[in-house]
Image: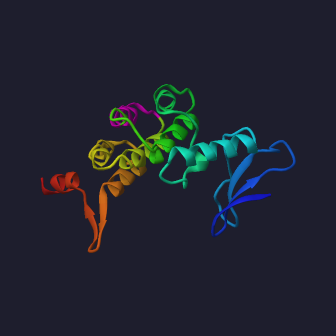
Amino acid sequence: MAVVWGGCTQYTLLVVTGSGRGRLVEVVAGSDVVPHFHTDADFLAWYERWLDFTLAGHRDLTWFSHQMAGDEQELVDTLINGSFATRRNAAAYTFITYPRPSPSLLDVLAQALSAEPHPIVRKTILPALQAQGEQGRDLLPAALTDPVPDVRRLAAILMTTNTRQGMRLGPVLSIMEAR
């Protein structure tokens, strides 16, 4: 059953039969995108998490299906110490929209970027850094030496800014290019 229409052919569906009964799943109809189950145990848990995110002031719920509940300390603990890459990734996604990050979050994200073994999690940490403003964007060049090309590519893209004249390199990239 459709619960949320995300635009075009993207939906959040409530599974009503079978082993996934009561769970919510993200689908993009007619595409190769693999359906993605929310981590919530059932509809009520999903709805309560959505209310918590909304009331807490998360800046955008675009990544909601990939995010997890928790205060900053719980999320940091999961990002740094979590046993499963999927949970570390969910914690990183949550920091993209986190409403009131502490000043120490930048250091935590930078540490996680340098220590994270899984490239998908490193790719998610990059927009979490960018979301922290200019200071976060200044930490993105660390990913330009990542062994995975997709991580390096995303870092370079996130370091650029849109202007009326088109894309411009961020200050750090401009300095590096001049060398």
Count of numbered circles on the image: 0
Segment colored magenta: 106-117
Q: Residue at x 15, y 53 (%)?
A: 175
With 80 as the anchor, is 129 left or right in this view? left
Q: Residue at x 45, y 47 (%)?
A: 96
Quadrant, the N terminus: bottom right
Q: Is residue 111 magenta?
A: yes
Residue at the farthest front position:
55
Residue at the farthest bottom position:
165
Asked if 29 appears above or below 149 in the picture, the reply is below
Q: Residue at x 75, y 45 (%)?
A: 43
Asked if 45 appears above or below 15 in the picture, the reply is above
Q: Residue at x 35, y 42 (%)?
A: 146
Picture coordinates of residue 92, whole percent (x, y): 48, 40
Quarter of the rendering containing residue 163: bottom left
With 176 as the anchor, is 101 left or right in this view? right
State the predominant SS element of the stretch in magenta: helix
Picture coordinates of residue 30, whole percent (x, y): 70, 67
With 17 as the anchor, is 151 left or right in this view? left
How was the colour assigned to the protein in this rendering?
rainbow
Q: Is residue 74 magenta?
A: no
Picture coordinates of residue 98, whole percent (x, y): 46, 43
Picture coordinates of residue 143, whole percent (x, y): 33, 44
Asked if 125 appears above or below 171 in the picture, the reply is above
Choose between 108 and 104: the one closer to the eye: 104
Residue at the farthest left position:
179
